[in-house]
Image (cartoon, grey):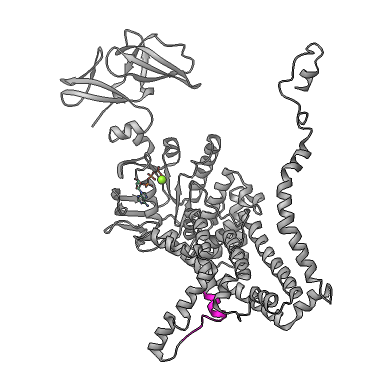
């Protein structure tokens, strides 16, 4: 990637940014968040949890409730409208100007900034090449596929060298295959440019793949902020655990430093009493009757190619999802034993 | 299908679907029969009078050159030009006022919004005579404006019985239709487009120029052409205000009833028809639907 493309990495700080829309419940509880310069942060959460609202507060399309502040680096931009914040925006619906060609769309921000024509043309061409759009420069927008449109939207947002790139579910309108390839392209772009980016999605796969850190949101609040690994392996609460990937819940009791689940007794640090344990499907292993901790029977087996996902009904307690090798021949009704590794089990806080 | 029907081993098997056209031998005839009533009405009420009108225009002592003579007659030419100017002016002012008002009404919701929209579209229900009457109530000799200006300055401002009065009436009559068209088009604008433009640094005015107006353009052209055609041909309002207002429909009326100059009236009618038809053709080609002038 050419040097001229490397952008300033501006940190962003949200201070007590809440949002209450007129005549409705609070959409966003006051939020404090620091986004490091050059970091890609992903807002992840179910529909209506306030992801877009937060993004729009950063963009300047919504103002936070009184008392909230938005800072770009040292500059307080709370009172600045979007057109004076120098942000790049990419929408799910592309939002390309239908009355302009691809090149005119990309040039628009430079034209508004009154860049001299030769400089404008040079930067547009450079950006179109970077996005592999060179051959489409003269096309009308309705002559492009969805993936091409979103690349034009990215080019249009980036060519003005924004201080932060804001993406609101940019891949949601695309089909699965295109989504994967464009996601890789966005990843390459964000790393290469070193730009601060905020990415909104409700797809945890996208969040895991793109985010340096993920902000998991629920009902207008932050449920957890952390790296993809932290979110996956150390979910802050039951909501995050259930929202990210598949999580099993196991009941057990602790007595005198030992955890009793099923027929097993495992070393455990924690107070005595009943506990609810969380364990990922890939952390439950099939074992022989002698080594197993929990017995049960297979209620369903789904072949997924690289693995087979079993639903096991233990002798007592809720059904467990267990991932095993793709070549497993187990089927409905087979009797199995499961082993639990205490190092890979979490107690619900 | 045809292979099956021709299969010798299945001679009596009827084809499940008749081959295209085999059951429709009488199609053109039937179509002609169905269209005949419409064609008769079209001929009786449109084609024949039109041809007659065109022929009458050329039926005077001068023959076909009567069209040219009628056109270059200073009085007629003046009437034509002032009608064109009036209609163009009405169209531009109506488009400007209605675009601003229509956008405002779509973007802002306030108590009484629905009532205001209903009130604004009220003039649609009025015939030209009533519009003329209202202009007189406003700017006539006993009108509101006259009374106010008399109280303020001592001089009475009266402009109902002139081009200005007609202009006012036509704008008043045209605004509702254009506002409704603008509102319908503005509801369909994608707010993300405006947000994208603003994120790229565009000021609110630039957003209007680069995003909103281009998106509204088809609606504005078609509504404008309709407004223009209506203003060209409207008669009722002018007739109510004053018989001496120099607009084409009035001129045709005067030539026909007062001067009994039937050839000139016919020639002017054909001309007016052509202009209005052209304007409506523009509206139709842009809007993609049929539209008709009123008034
Ligand atoms: N302009 C608005 N007026 C009133 N309520 C709003 C407005 N915009 C959003 N909301 C409400 O605020 C809450 C959060 O909305 P937001 O768009 O931020 O959700 P989201 O997380 O982006 O959801 P999605 O995944 O469906 O896009 C929702 O309950 C929504 O109904
Ligand atoms: Mg959203």
Which residues, given as a range, are shown in magenta?
B157-168
Viewer-closest of B260 and A128:
B260
- Give the image quarter of residue B85: bottom right
**Residue B161 lies in the magenta-colored region:** yes
Residue under the image location 68 percent in, 81 percent down: B78
**Residue A167 lies in the magenta-colored region:** no
Report x, y in % for residue B155: 44, 91
Report x, y in % for residue B257: 68, 75
Report x, y in % for residue B77: 71, 79
Report x, y in % for residue B113: 38, 60
Q: In this view, does B182 lie above or below A174?
A: below
Residue under the image location 39 percent in, 8 percent down: A334
Residue under the image location 67 percent in, 60 percent down: B281
> Farthest residue toward the bottom?
B154
Residue under the image location 61 percent in, 81 percent down: B244
* B191 sits left or right of A346 in the view: right
Q: In this view, does A54 lie above or below B265?
A: above
Q: Is residue A4 above or below residue A267?
A: below
Does residue B206 show up? no
The quarter of the image holding the C terminus of chain A is top left
All told, the count of numbered labels is 0
Viewer-closest of B232 and A267:
B232
* B95 sits left or right of A255 in the view: right
């Amino acid at each position: 990637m050419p040097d001229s493309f490397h952008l300033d990495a501006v940190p962003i700080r949200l201070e007590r940014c809440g949002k209450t829309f007129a005549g409705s419940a609070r959409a966003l509880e006051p939020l404090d968040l620091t986004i490091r310069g050059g970091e890609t942060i992903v807002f992840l959460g179910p529909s209506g949890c306030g992801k877009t609202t937060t993004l729009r507060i950063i963009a300047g399309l919504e103002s936070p409730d009184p008392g909230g502040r938005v800072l770009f680096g040292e500059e307080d931009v709370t009172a600045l409208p979007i057109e004076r914040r120098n942000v790049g925006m990419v929408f799910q619906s592309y939002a390309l100007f239908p009355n302009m060609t691809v090149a005119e769309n990309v040039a628009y921000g430079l034209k508004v900034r009154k860049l001299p024509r030769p400089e404008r043309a040079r930067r547009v061409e450079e950006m179109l090449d970077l996005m592999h759009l060179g051959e489409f420069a003269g096309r009308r927008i309705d002559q492009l596929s969805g993936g091409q449109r979103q690349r034009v939207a990215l080019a249009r947002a980036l060519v003005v060298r924004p201080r932060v790139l804001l993406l609101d579910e940019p891949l949601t309108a695309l089909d699965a295959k295109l989504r994967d390839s464009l996601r890789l392209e966005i990843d390459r772009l964000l790393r290469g440019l070193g730009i601060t980016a905020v990415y909104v999605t409700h797809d945890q796969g996208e969040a895991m793949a793109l985010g340096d850190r993920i902000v998991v949101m629920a009902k207008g609040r932050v449920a957890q902020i952390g790296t993809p690994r932290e979110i996956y392996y150390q979910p802050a609460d039951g909501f995050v655990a259930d929202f990210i990937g598949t999580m099993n819940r196991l009941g057990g009791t602790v007595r005198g430093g030992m955890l009793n689940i099923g027929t097993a007794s495992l070393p455990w640090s924690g107070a005595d009493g009943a506990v609810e344990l969380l364990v990922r499907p890939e952390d439950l292993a099939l074992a022989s009757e002698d080594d197993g901790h929990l017995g049960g029977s297979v209620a369903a087996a789904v072949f997924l190619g690289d693995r087979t996902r079993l639903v096991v009904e233990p002798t007592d307690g809720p059904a467990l999802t267990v991932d095993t090798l793709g070549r497993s021949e187990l089927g409905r009704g087979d009797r199995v034993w499961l082993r639990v590794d205490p190092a890979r089990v979490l107690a619900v806080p | 299908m045809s292979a099956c029907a021709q299969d010798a081993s299945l001679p009596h098997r009827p084809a499940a679907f008749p081959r295209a056209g085999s059951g429709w031998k009488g199609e053109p005839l039937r179509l002609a029969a169905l269209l005949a009533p419409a064609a008769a009405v079209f001929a009786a009420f449109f084609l024949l009078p039109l041809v007659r009108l065109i022929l009458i225009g050329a039926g005077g002592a001068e023959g076909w050159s009567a069209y040219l003579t009628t056109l270059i007659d200073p009085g007629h030419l003046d009437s034509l030009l002032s009608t064109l100017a009036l209609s163009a002016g009405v169209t531009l002012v109506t488009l400007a006022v209605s675009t601003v008002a229509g956008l405002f009404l779509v973007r802002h919701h306030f108590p009484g919004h629905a009532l205001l929209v209903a009130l604004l579209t009220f003039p649609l229900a009025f015939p030209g005579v009533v519009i003329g009457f209202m202009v007189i109530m406003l700017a006539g000799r006993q009108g509101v404006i006259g009374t106010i200006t008399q109280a303020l300055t001592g001089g009475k401002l009266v402009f109902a019985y002139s081009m200005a009065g007609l202009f006012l009436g036509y704008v008043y009559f045209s605004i509702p239709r254009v506002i409704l068209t603008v509102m319908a088009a503005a509801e369909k604008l994608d707010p993300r487009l405006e947000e994208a433009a603003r994120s790229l640094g565009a000021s609110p005015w630039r957003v209007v120029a680069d995003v909103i107006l281009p998106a509204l353009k088809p609606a504005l052209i078609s509504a404008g052409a309709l407004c223009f055609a209506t203003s060209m041909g409207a008669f009722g309002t002018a007739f109510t205000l004053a018989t001496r207002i120099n607009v084409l429909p009035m001129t045709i009326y005067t030539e026909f009833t007062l001067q009994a100059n039937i050839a000139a009236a016919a020639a002017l009618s054909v001309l007016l028809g052509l202009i209005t038809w052209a304007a409506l053709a523009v509206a139709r080609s842009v809007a993609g639907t049929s539209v008709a002038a009123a008034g």
